[in-house]
């Protein structure tokens, strides 16, 4: 009987601890039941991801790498050989990404052409005109808004 009374006395001393443990256990069971009780139909429908998203992100990263490469070259951090080799590698990688975009457009039936009813007649482009960068003098076959070499605004110059 003495052992029973000692156990009862110990229970009275630790009553607050026992109640705290019991409340903690009840809360843990409730949280687990809530998490496991979420049904799939209760979850929101995710927005469909664009098939071009990862390619656009990769293309933007390559363009940024090209800008950084040119910046470091102009600061003198890279030799001419390193600059040219790295630039060619990045341009090859960009060409691969752009070809993947074109392949994906063909697969999805998005060839970029407007429907025949909405097609506007385009004036013929002069074959002599080309884009020439006023800053670095780089020439391009097509008209560009910004130079592909230095990134500065372009102007259209007619070659004679």
Image (spheres, rainbow, N blue to C red):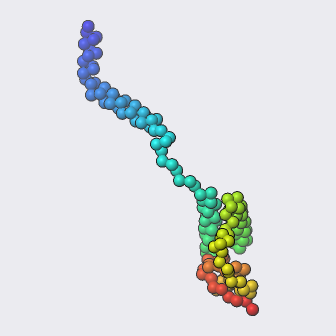
In the rendered view, would you say 82 is above or below 33? below
Percent from the top left, x then y, of residue 23? 32, 30
In the rendered view, would you say 29 is above or below 129? above
Tell me if 69 is positioned left or right of 42 in this view. right
Tell me if 117 is positioned left or right of 34 in this view. right
Q: Which residue is at a point 65% across and 77% down the rendered structure image?
A: 120
Q: Quadrant of residue 13?
A: top left
Q: Which residue is at a point 70% across and 58% down the rendered structure image?
A: 107
Residue sitting nearer the eye, 76 or 92: 92
Residue sitting nearer the eye, 32 or 75: 32
In the rendered view, would you say 149 is above or below 5? below
Confirm whether residue 154 shows in the render.
yes
Q: Which residue is at a point 48% across and 47% down the rendered structure image?
A: 44
Confirm whether residue 98 shows in the render.
no
Q: Quadrant of the N terminus?
A: top left
Q: Quadrant of the C terminus?
A: bottom right
Q: Quadrant of residue 153?
A: bottom right
Q: Which residue is at a point 29% across and 27% down the rendered structure image?
A: 19
Percent from the top left, x then y, of residue 54? 61, 58
Residue found at the very far front of the displayed protein: 117
Percent from the top left, x then y, of residue 69? 64, 70
Residue sitting nearer the eye, 120 or 144: 120
Percent from the top left, x then y, of residue 134? 64, 86
In the rendered view, would you say 88 is above or below 144? above
Residue sitting nearer the eye, 72 or 146: 146
């Amino acid at each position: 009987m003495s052992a029973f009374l000692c156990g009862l006395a110990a229970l009275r001393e630790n009553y607050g601890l026992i109640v705290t443990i019991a409340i903690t256990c009840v809360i843990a069971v409730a949280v687990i039941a809530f998490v496991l009780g979420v049904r799939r139909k209760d979850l929101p429908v995710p927005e469909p991801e664009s098939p071009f998203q990862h390619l656009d992100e990769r293309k933007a990263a390559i363009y940024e790498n090209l800008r950084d490469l040119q910046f470091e070259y102009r600061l003198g951090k890279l030799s001419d050989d390193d600059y040219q080799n790295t630039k060619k590698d990045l341009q090859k990688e960009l060409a691969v990404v752009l070809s993947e975009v074109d392949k994906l457009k063909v697969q999805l039936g998005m060839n970029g052409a407007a429907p025949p009813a909405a097609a506007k007649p385009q004036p013929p482009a002069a074959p002599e005109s080309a884009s020439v960068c006023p800053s670095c003098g780089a020439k391009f076959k097509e008209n560009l808004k910004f130079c592909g070499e230095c990134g500065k605004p372009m102007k259209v110059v007619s070659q004679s």
